Image (tube, rainbow, N blue to C red):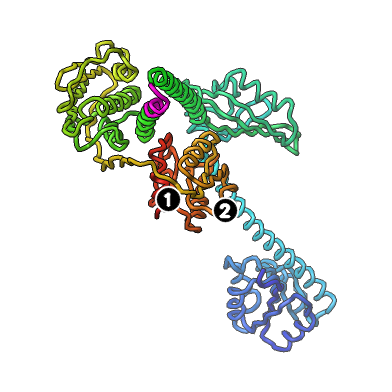
């Protein structure tokens, strides 16, 4: 306490009596105040806490008895012990009046020092004990306040926690049911408390048996976990992950069980979705590989030469890859027909200047998009070889209509050489006829003398969106008549796929590169950039699952020109390198080499 001294008050109208009392009472830890009248004494009592008051009986105006009565009439001074100091005879009637006024004792003049000190020491110790009790009371109040705050915080955490916090005794009778449990299971604490777990209908027999085994075989503070299904008030089962701790009461030795339950419904759904996605991804990858295998086999069977096979196979593979890129951007939900056409223009299969197209905005289902992408590639390739795009004045009219029941795409060639039906059905024609899926009459062809006309009809997998697609600028593919030579340039290929790296090295070496080094990891790439003499670099967009931002910065730091070779779009590549060209996988040599040659030339 701020003021730890014990205080006595001496009230006497004679100064010498005060000095004598002070001399006899003086001791460590004791403060003695003096008042020469009843009024002065009452004033001091209002501002100080006294453990004992010595009142002189004989005082002018207001004597000691009257002062004692005044003290008993006020709440603040009522409990101050009073010892009367008197020189009067030991009159019993006077004593009775003093005790009636609230005195605890009398001291007679002349003062006996031993008696005075002995009586004063009793009240000094009582005052010390009272101060100690006050100190302990204040400490207990502080502790109680901190306890209440801690309990309030714990209750707030428990009430707002996504966990259901539940306690039960060794017989699995519910003793605590948090707000989180009320929200999770739709059962109020008033209904659940006092019930057995199994009888409440909240858990089935098997789950209750798991909890009972924890209590029966547990010891103090042992921890457990399990997966159980709990039943809501509406009868719906919720998958939960439950964590349990057995606690032992130190007084009676009884065990109790504290439970924390987490609703894992969303986790289970996520796991199911992940499993579904993995299965779907596995299906799509294998289906795509099967398509690539079929394209390779059929192209090889009908190719006249190795160069013809490479040109046909790579072109079809590029068309398939571009359609995949469009679908990936749309999370494999659908693809716009306009985008498929634009990609054929970018690839150089179609000439935008000689293509007239007209039709509403339509979205194609993934399977239709992939088939139409291959079909547009075949139609454009055939037109460039034998049809309207093989001569300067020819053009292609591409139109389509769409309603609730039917989508009809019409490819009409004009101004080209006279065409005739082929003597045999090639793989390209087979791909075009496959555009309608399983519909045998979904594709028709008219070998008109002025130009071939293809009509593709789809009855499913086509939709018209409420809002048209945003227009994207079309960058037609540049043509390179002469194969560029790399003239002994030193090239660093940063690629983690060995077969892709080997293919790139072969193309670069065949084009005259002097030295081609391969780095398959971030560390190898950074070491090569630091130590090797490099003219140009090819950087994969991802190395074994790691981002390549650090590698791109290192190349930029050494002023080594580079391009990205990746299946990612620009948004998934390191930012801040918009000037670095992108060669999309799978790539063609005639698309790779001009980019490398231009980087070296700069």
Q: Residue at x 36, y 29 (%)?
A: 315
- Depth order, front residue of 41/135: 135
Tell which circle, 1 or 2, labels the residue nearer the N-terminal end. Answer: 2
User: Which tag is nearer the camera, tag 1 or tag 2?
Assistant: 2
Instruction: Classify 81 as above or below 274.
Output: below
Q: In the visual, does 228 lie left or right of 356? A: right
Q: Residue at x 66, y 71 (%)?
A: 2
Q: Residue at x 75, y 82 (%)?
A: 22
Position of the N terminus, as image quadrant, is bottom right
Q: Mark number for residue 575?
A: 1
Q: Is residue 373 visible?
A: yes
Instruction: Classify 88 as above or below 227.
Output: below
Hey, which residue is sitting farthest right in the picture? 114
Q: In the visual, does 132 lie left or right of 313? A: right
- Depth order, front residue of 400/498: 498
| Boundaries of the magenta span | 304-313
Position of the C terminus, as image quadrant, is bottom left
Numbered disc 1: secondary structure: loop
Residue under numbered circle 2? 532
Instruction: Classify 201 as above or below 6.
Output: above
Q: Is residue 66 visible?
A: no
């Amino acid at each position: 306490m701020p003021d730890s001294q014990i205080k006595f008050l001496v009230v006497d109208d004679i100064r010498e009596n005060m000095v004598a009392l002070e001399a006899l009472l003086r001791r460590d830890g004791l403060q003695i105040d003096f008042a020469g009248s009843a009024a002065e004494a009452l004033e001091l009592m209002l501002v100080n806490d006294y453990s004992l008051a010595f009142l002189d009986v004989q005082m002018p105006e207001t004597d000691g008895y009257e002062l004692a009565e005044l003290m008993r009439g006020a709440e603040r001074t009522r409990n101050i012990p009073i010892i009367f100091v008197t020189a009067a005879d030991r009159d019993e009637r006077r004593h009775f009046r003093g005790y009636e006024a609230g005195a605890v004792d009398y001291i007679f003049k002349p003062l006996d020092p031993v008696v005075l000190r002995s009586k004063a020491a009793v009240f000094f110790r009582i005052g010390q004990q009272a101060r100690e009790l006050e100190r302990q009371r204040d400490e207990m109040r502080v502790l109680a306040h901190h306890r209440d705050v801690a309990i309030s915080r714990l209750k707030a955490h428990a009430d707002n926690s996504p966990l259901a916090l539940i306690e039960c005794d060794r017989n699995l009778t519910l003793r605590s049911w948090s707000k989180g449990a009320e929200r999770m299971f739709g059962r109020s604490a008033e209904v659940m408390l006092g019930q057995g777990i199994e009888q409440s209908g909240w858990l089935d027999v098997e789950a209750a048996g798991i909890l009972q085994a924890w209590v029966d075989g547990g010891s103090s503070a042992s921890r457990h976990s399990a997966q159980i299904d709990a039943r809501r008030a509406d009868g719906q089962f919720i998958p939960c992950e439950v964590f349990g701790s057995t606690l032992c009461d130190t007084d009676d030795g009884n065990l109790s069980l504290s439970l924390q339950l987490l609703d894992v419904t969303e986790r289970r759904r996520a796991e199911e979705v992940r499993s579904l996605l993995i299965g779907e991804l596995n299906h799509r990858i294998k289906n795509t590989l099967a398509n690539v295998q079929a394209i390779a086999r059929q192209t090889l069977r009908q190719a006249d030469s190795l160069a013809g096979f490479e040109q046909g196979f790579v072109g079809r593979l590029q068309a398939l890859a571009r359609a995949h890129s469009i679908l990936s951007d749309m999370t494999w939900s659908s693809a716009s027909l306009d985008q498929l056409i634009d990609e054929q223009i970018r690839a150089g299969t179609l000439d935008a200047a000689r293509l007239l197209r007209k039709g509403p905005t339509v979205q194609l289902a993934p399977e239709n998009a992939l088939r139409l992408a291959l079909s547009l590639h075949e139609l454009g390739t055939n037109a460039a070889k034998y049809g309207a795009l093989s001569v300067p004045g020819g053009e292609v009219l591409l139109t389509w209509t769409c309603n609730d029941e039917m989508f009809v795409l019409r490819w009409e060639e004009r101004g080209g050489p006279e065409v005739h039906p082929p003597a045999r059905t090639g793989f390209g024609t087979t791909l075009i006829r496959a555009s309608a899926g399983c519909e045998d009459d979904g594709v028709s062809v008219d070998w008109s003398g002025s130009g071939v006309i293809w009509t593709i009809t789809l009855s499913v997998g086509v939709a018209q969106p409420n809002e048209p697609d945003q227009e994207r600028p079309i960058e037609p593919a540049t043509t390179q008549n002469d194969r560029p030579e790399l003239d002994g340039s030193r090239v660093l290929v940063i690629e983690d796929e060995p077969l892709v790296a080997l293919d790139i090295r072969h193309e670069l070496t065949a084009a005259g590169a002097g030295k081609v080094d391969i780095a398959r990891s971030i560390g190898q790439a950074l070491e090569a950039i630091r130590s090797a003499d490099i003219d140009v670099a090819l950087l994969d967009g991802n190395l074994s699952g790691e981002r390549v931002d650090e590698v791109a910065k290192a190349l930029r730091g050494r002023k080594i020109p580079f391009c990205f070779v990746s299946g990612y779009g620009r948004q998934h590549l390191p930012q801040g390198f918009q000037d670095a060209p992108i060669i999309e996988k799978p790539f063609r040599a005639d698309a790779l080499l001009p980019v490398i040659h231009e980087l070296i030339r700069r």
